[in-house]
Image (tube, rainbow, N blue to C red):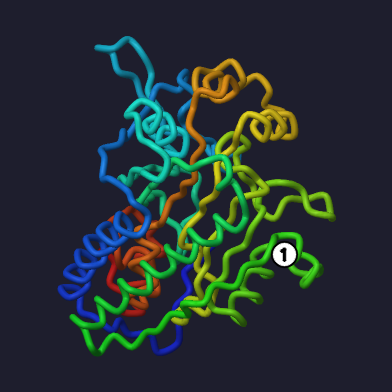
Amino acid sequence: MNKVIVPEHYCSMLSMYETQEAIGIIKSTMQKKLCMALHLKRVTAPLFVDPKSGLNDDLNGVERPVSFEIPAANMEAQVVHSLAKWKRMALYRYGFRVGKGILTDMNAIRRDEELDNLHSCYVDQWDWEKVIDACERTEDYLKAVVKRIVGVICNTLDELKYHYPHLDLDLERDVVFVTSQQLYDLYPELTPKERENAFVKEHRTVFIMQIGDKLSNGEPHDGRAPDYDDWKLNGDLLFWHETLGCALEISSMGIRVNEQSLDEQLKKAGCVERRNLPFHKLLLEGKLPLTIGGGIGQSRVCMLLLGKAHVGEVQASIWDQITLDTCEKAGIELL
């Protein structure tokens, strides 16, 4: 089934040449501003990890990792799904102190992703993680960090519009915070994605909190692995994407699990056997630093700030033939 949405009268505000140039401006500006706003240092991260380390994430719990053999090391490796656990281990190994953190480029392959305007099998993110104090494991601290990230994104748009004055876009800087349960209570008859669209259309910039645990209807708003975010102190950042007329998730982030929340969430998820993995053992023994972190989609940010209709306009990936034909007919230039 063709899942490509072609907005009526869509025309890119930038040429393909300008688009490539603008992507470079966005990525360099975002990296610099994120490091300044959150006190982060740029580090190098792995493309693949040893599955026995427990460092790879299973995201919603159903995605299959891409695996391959490394004969010289006599082992199998997995392409990372995200770097949530690797980053926390890196902060521990590198000796980062409270208030300091790391930023890295994360590239991943999600083989089971459905392909549409917003989703690709190639994922690129700014992954960040920061050491915090125990007293900062609060909702107020989480909200303060979210506001800083929104400020970075909006300031990057301002920088971009300086270079391209004809870029006719605006973002809402004031973030509305809502829990997944509150969202369900507002729209009990809608699906989770429909709830997001309805709420974000009204408020423009929204952070949906407390994702992973079951709601009053017995179902979670969305799946979340039990061993990185604390389900009571996490969330998704969404902006209204005018071109497609839908909510666009830019970031998933949160304050990470401590010993107690990890133990509780592993039980709820039926994953207690993970306690014996190296990462989980260190965490349960209280040896890993308390952290906050997340991933910010690079292609998603580029789509948002450039008003693009398809993620393939800002990243090079592989698409099915129907998508290629539909986009060509509509004048949507895929990279």
Q: Residue 98 location in percent, x, y?
A: 42, 40
Q: Is residue 288 above or below residue 217?
A: above
Residue at (69%, 69%) from the top-left corner? Answer: 195
**In which quarter of the view is residue 6 placed?**
bottom left
Residue at (72%, 46%) from the top-left corner? Answer: 213
Q: Quadrant of the C terminus?
A: bottom left
Q: Residue 276 location in percent, x, y?
A: 59, 15
Q: Decide which of 141, 201 is in the foreground and name it.
A: 141
Q: Residue 168 location in percent, x, y?
A: 33, 88
Q: Few, some or many C-alpha atoms within 10 Å of disc 1 (few <14, some 14-19, many ≥20)?
A: few
**In which quarter of the view is residue 69 placed?**
top left
Q: Decide which of 64, 129 is in the foreground and name it.
A: 129
At label 1, the amino acid type is: Thr
Q: Is residue 204 above or below residue 94?
A: below
Numbered circles on residues, count: 1
Residue at (65%, 19%) from the top-left corner? Answer: 273
Residue marked by disc 1: 191
Q: Is residue 324 above or below residue 289?
A: below
What secondary structure is marked by label 1? loop
Left or right: 187, with 18 as reference point: right
Residue at (84%, 55%) from the top-left corner? Answer: 217
Residue 290 visible in image? yes
Q: Quadrant of the N terminus?
A: bottom right
Q: Residue 292 location in percent, x, y?
A: 49, 45
**In which quarter of the view is residue 208 placed?**
bottom right
